[in-house]
Image (tube, helix red, strand yellow):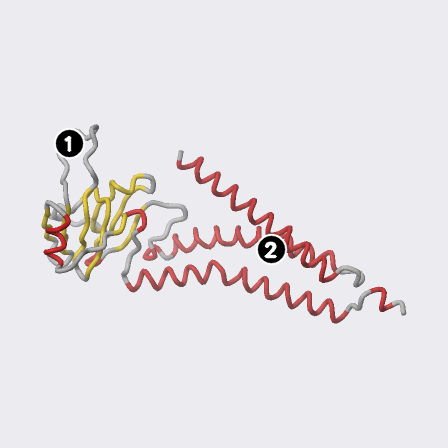
Amino acid sequence: MDFIGDLFALAFLVCLASAAGAGLAFTVWLLTRGRGPGHKRLVLLGASLPLASLAYAFIFEIAFGLFVPAAHETFPGDIDEPLPGGYSLKGLDKMPEYSFITRSPDFTGQVQVPSNIASIAVEGQLVLGSFRTRQPWDTLPLPSGFFAFNTATSTEMLFANKAELDSFAGHSVSLIETSRFSSREPKVKLLRRLGLVGDVFLPILALVVLGMKILAYRRANKPLAQALQ
């Protein structure tokens, strides 16, 4: 099902890029029509720019994920969010309520860490969160309620309800669903900003170059009606 969903998402993006290419090509045609030969090449460049940008974004995301693994970005991908102390929140993209905390690489004697996490918050070295609701088909014993995990000491505390968790934290804790949680680690945030810049830098540069080519073409080629006078 995940593969089919990804195919539909890709098909939608391709259709969107194709529509954008048609609109951009029409705009370029309006700006260059009636000015002699050479405008067709600019129209083709405008038509191909959105699709080329989409292909570049996919290739860049794959390369960025392979060569900069500390960014922990996947497209599309599962949950893999760095936490303090070398720990990470991991989980399946389609089952975020089964997320768990682990430390990579695993080391001998690693303590038991929370799993089946539905929501989470990070405050300093503390990871606060809630466990998923037990379902009728669950056969194994599962933790319930809320937890606080200290990544500095690798210790866990359990709480029966949200009020106890808030009392431990000293304020009302705002928990975020694991599917929407994003790491606050400075290195990860920096790498993700760089990844976003990398995604849009070349497409924006290509659009600027196309605009400059259109301006140069318009200056070098007067409308045919004026040229014949």
Kindly identify the residue that appears in the image at 54 percent across and 54 percent down.
53
Kindly identify the residue that appears in the image at 29 percent across and 57 percent down.
183
Give the side of residue 206 with respect to residue 59, left or right: right
Kindly identify the residue that appears in the image at 32 percent across and 50 percent down.
180
Which residue ends up furthest to the bottom in the rendered image? 219
Comes first in the chain, label 2 or label 1: 2
Percent from the top left, x then y, of residue 1?
40, 33
Quadrant of the rendered structure where residue 93 is?
Answer: top left
Q: Is the residue marked by circle 1 packed among few (<14), some (14-19), or many (20+) residues within 10 Å?
A: few
Q: Is the residue marked by circle 2 packed among few (<14), some (14-19), or many (20+) residues within 10 Å?
A: many
Kindly identify the residue that appears in the image at 40 percent across and 37 percent down.
2
The amino acid pointed to by label 2 is Leu
**Residues at marks 2 and 1, CA–CA distance in whole angstroms:** 54 Å
Percent from the top left, x then y, of residue 187?
30, 63
Secondary structure type for disc 2: helix
Which image quadrant: the C terminus? bottom right
160 and 65: which is toward the camera: 160
Give the side of residue 74 with respect to residue 111, left or right: right
Mark 1 sits on what residue? Answer: 140
Mark 2 sits on what residue? Answer: 49
The amino acid pointed to by label 1 is Leu
